[in-house]
């Protein structure tokens, strides 16, 4: 993998085989951002890179001090390997060989990562997926379900931040590969 092998971050429909898809099907907010990188990237490599990237370490720092949910790089590796079922403010809700779904400690949001090979041979690449789900709240007066107001207000920021997190994970993957080479 190298910088020349990077594509743009794309907004895509959530794949039906996604562990996050049930939330989409229920009408909860979901999103899906992808980027293609040259070469083979395993799910484990992606999860480690995502949760140990520079930008995500800022989020980990905030979680440690604001909600007493600390985490470490070795814990991110254990999460990626499936040997722990909680990390910082999240617990594992679902895990398959190529995807991971986490639920926040309040049960309001979901984070989803998936690595999927695309192309073969000299054209081999990996599509990295990052998605979020926000569980709808039921209005007590009307009985209607909708995204909670704080999440609606932060949606624009969230979309920019999600793209930045995905890009930061890719930069981490590139940095790790260049240190191994």
Image: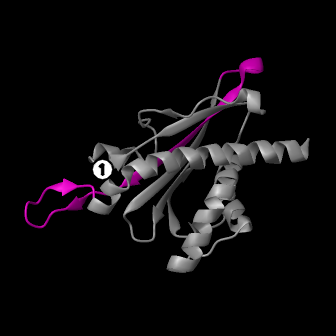
Q: Nearer the viewer, residue 78 or 123?
A: 123
x and y percentages locating residue 16 in the rendered image = 41, 36
Residue drawn at the location 58% of the way across and 64% of the way down: 59
Quarter of the rendering occupied by the C terminus: top right
Q: Is residue 56 left or right of residue 110?
A: right
Scheme of colours in the image:
one colour
Residue drawn at the location 45% of the way across and 32% of the way down: 12
Image-quadrant location for residue 39: top right
> Which contiguous range is marked in magenta?
119-148
Q: Nearer the viewer, residue 31 or 157?
A: 157
Q: Is residue 78 left or right of residue 101?
A: right
> Does 144 lie within the magenta span?
yes
Residue 65 visible, this angle: yes
Residue drawn at the location 80% of the way across and 46% of the way down: 175
Image-quadrant location for residue 149: bottom left
x and y percentages locating residue 66 in the rendered image = 51, 78
Q: Would you name the residue on which mark 1 appears?
A: 28
State the residue lying farthest toward the right: 181
Q: Secondary structure at mark 1?
A: loop
State the residue lying farthest toward the left: 141
Residue 132 visible, this angle: no
């Amino acid at each position: 993998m190298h910088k020349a092998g990077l594509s743009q971050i794309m907004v895509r429909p959530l794949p039906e085989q996604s562990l996050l898809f049930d939330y989409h099907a229920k009408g909860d907010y979901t999103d899906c951002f992808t980027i293609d990188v040259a070469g083979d990237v395993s799910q484990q490599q992606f999860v480690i890179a995502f949760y140990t990237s520079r930008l995500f370490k800022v989020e980990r720092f905030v979680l440690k001090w604001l909600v007493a949910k600390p985490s470490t790089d070795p814990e991110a590796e254990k999460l990626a390997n499936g040997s722990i079922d909680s990390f910082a403010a999240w617990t594992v809700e679902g895990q398959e060989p190529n995807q991971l779904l986490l639920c926040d400690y309040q049960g309001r949001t979901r984070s989803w990562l998936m690595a999927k090979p695309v192309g073969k041979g000299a054209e081999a690449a990996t599509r990295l997926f990052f998605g979020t789900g926000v569980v709808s709240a039921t209005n007590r007066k009307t009985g209607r379900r909708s995204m909670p107001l704080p999440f609606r207000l932060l949606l624009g920021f969230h979309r920019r931040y999600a793209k930045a997190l995905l890009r930061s994970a890719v930069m981490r993957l590139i940095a790790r590969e260049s240190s191994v080479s």
